[in-house]
Image: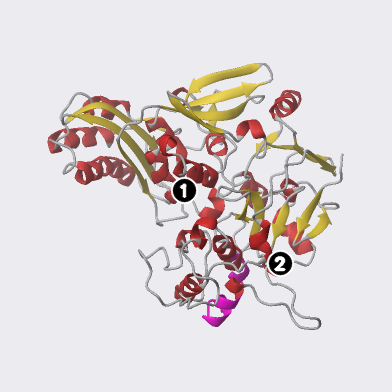
């Protein structure tokens, strides 16, 4: 077994002597790369952002920003990482490095004040700077690029920059306008830009990792059969993909595991297929990868998932989070379960002896409990086809983006000749598990899609589940929002659907 090492800013760096639980953030800071900061240790502020070379969509490699505070350094074994310190290019002999275009615009437009959050912003901005789809809209750097040109729609700049790329980065000094100006001022990478050229080459291959120290181990199997064998031998092992949930446990609750098994790069869990009667999505694909693959596949488009993605945490989190992880934690306030319940999804559960398919509606058995055994993995999610044409996902939270939902409602309807032929409603945040609103579904099916029908079903929907009061919302508020969600969907569709 080759010693674990990470390529950081072009230089191979051994993982030893870091412990298996040490985050990429602490690993980098221990080696003098202190641009990345710890602000929240939960993946909510983006001060720790770094870029990682990952398989691309339009090009062989994409530069993907992630939260270094959540990912174990061992999970980056064999991978390439760029920090804020690695963005500048070497100048002439004896001269200081030349600022990266993103760094230069942030400095020129006053996007940095105290500087604490700046390196994280810069890494997230640099990843968006190199996104191939954006580059098609941008002039080359330095050619009549103006940061004060009007935005296309308030969230996309004239240079194609998507401000959602910064939804996981928080700043408390600048008011964001100068940061936005800097984002809208960058052009397209020059032809000799080394990080742009790197995208034309294949990303690093996943490597099998067996890193043990001080009585604990981080293991990355080479394939699914080996992973399933490991879980049968060590059922107590913690399974991680993007580590967006486990990383919080490590940081905030100081949890440690004797054995962590990483399944994020297993090829058998990173496939997406569109069959005649279903779409199958690998459980280890990140939400960003799913989103971009579905965007590029007309027959594989799932509109309800497309409505979910922008509201699921932040781009930084979606770059690591997976459907398998969101379902595997069993959280009643996870954002994907209500959507997948409305889509009538099933889970493919694999163990060393074979596979079984379980409808998601039968998967959850209690608070953070499910039918999945410790030696099983969620290999894939299957969404049946055809899809219901009328859909909605309403997430009620205190912030528009990057927040935990108080209530989540997903609706999928088939309406024919003004009559609801089929209704599926998934709910989160109103019970110990995500649930289907069966009574509200029954109140809709077979009835005309009218205000009276919706009002009757909304009253029933408001009584579904057993909502509780906590610091996010009262039980009464949660119940009220359930009914309002259906009324909102009717208001959005009643002009398009005959009544």
Q: CA distance from mark 2 to mark 1?
A: 29 Å
Q: Toward the viewer: 483 or 336? A: 336
Residue indicated by mark 2:
86
Q: Where residue 306 sits: x, y (%)?
A: 41, 44
Q: Give the image quarter of residue 305.
A: top left
Q: Which residue is mark 1?
A: 312
Quadrant of the snapshot with the C terminus: top left
92 above or below 202? Answer: below
The reply to whether the magenta stretch includes residue 478 is no
Q: Quadrant of the rendered structure where residue 387 is? A: top left
**Left or right for 29, reference 264:** right
Secondary structure beneath disc 2?
helix
Q: Looking at the image, which residue sits at the far front? A: 191
Q: Taking 445 as reference, is 163 above or below it?
A: below
Give, as a single range, the part of the protein colored magenta: 104-120
Neighbor class of circle 2 (other Cα within 10 Å; few <14, some 14-19, many 20+) is: some
x 52%, y 20%: residue = 357
Q: Could you say where residue 273 lies in the image, as x and y percent from the top left?
A: 52, 31
Whether residue 173 is visible here, answered yes or no, is yes
Q: Residue at x 62, y 49 (%)?
A: 248
């Amino acid at each position: 077994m080759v010693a674990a090492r990470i390529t950081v800013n072009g230089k191979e760096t051994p993982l030893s002597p870091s412990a298996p639980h040490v985050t990429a953030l602490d690993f980098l800071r221990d080696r003098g790369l202190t641009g990345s900061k710890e602000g929240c240790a939960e993946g909510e502020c983006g001060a720790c952002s770094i870029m990682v070379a990952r398989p691309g969509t339009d090009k062989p490699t994409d530069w993907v920003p992630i939260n270094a505070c959540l990912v174990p350094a061992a999970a980056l074994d064999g991978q390439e990482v760029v920090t804020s310190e690695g963005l500048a290019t070497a100048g002439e002999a004896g001269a200081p490095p030349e600022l990266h275009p993103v760094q230069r615009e942030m400095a020129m437009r006053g996007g940095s004040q105290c500087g604490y959050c700046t390196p994280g912003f810069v890494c997230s901005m640099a990843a968006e700077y190199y996104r191939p789809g954006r580059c098609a809209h941008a002039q080359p750097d330095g050619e009549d690029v103006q940061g004060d040109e009007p935005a296309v729609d308030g969230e996309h700049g004239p240079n194609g920059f998507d401000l959602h790329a910064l939804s996981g980065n928080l700043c408390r000094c600048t008011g964001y306008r100068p940061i936005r100006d800097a984002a809208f001022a960058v052009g397209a990478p020059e032809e000799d830009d080394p990080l742009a050229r790197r995208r034309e080459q294949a990303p690093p291959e996943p490597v099998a990792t067996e890193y043990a120290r001080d009585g604990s181990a981080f293991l990355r199997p080479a394939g699914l059969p080996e992973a399933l064998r490991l879980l049968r031998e060590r059922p107590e092992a913690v399974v991680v993909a993007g580590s967006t949930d486990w990383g919080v446990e490590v940081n905030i609750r100081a949890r440690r595991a004797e054995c962590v098994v990483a399944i994020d790069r297993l090829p058998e869990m990173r496939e997406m297929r569109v069959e005649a009667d279903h779409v199958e999505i690998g459980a280890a694909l990140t939400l960003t990868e799913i989103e971009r693959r579905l965007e590029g596949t007309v027959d594989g488009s799932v509109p309800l998932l497309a409505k979910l993605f922008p509201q699921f945490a932040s781009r930084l989190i979606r770059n690591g989070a997976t459907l398998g992880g969101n379902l595997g934690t069993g959280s009643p306030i996870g954002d994907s379960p209500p959507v997948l319940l409305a889509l009538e999804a099933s889970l493919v559960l694999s163990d060393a002896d074979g596979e079984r398919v379980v409808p998601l509606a039968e998967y959850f058995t209690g608070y953070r409990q499910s039918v999945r055994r410790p030696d099983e993995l969620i290999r894939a999610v299957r969404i049946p086809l055809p899809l219901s044409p009328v859909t909605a996902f309403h997430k009620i939270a205190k912030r528009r983006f990057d927040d935990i939902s108080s209530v989540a409602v997903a609706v999928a309807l088939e309406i024919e000749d003004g009559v609801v032929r089929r209704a599926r409603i998934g709910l989160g945040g109103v019970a110990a598990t995500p649930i289907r609103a069966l009574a509200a579904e029954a109140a809709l099916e077979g009835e005309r899609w009218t205000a009276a029908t919706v009002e009757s079903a909304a009253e029933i929907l408001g009584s579904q589940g057993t909502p509780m009061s906590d610091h996010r919302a009262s039980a009464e508020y949660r119940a009220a929002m359930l009914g309002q969600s259906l009324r909102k969907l009717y208001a959005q569709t009643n002009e398009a659907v005959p009544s």
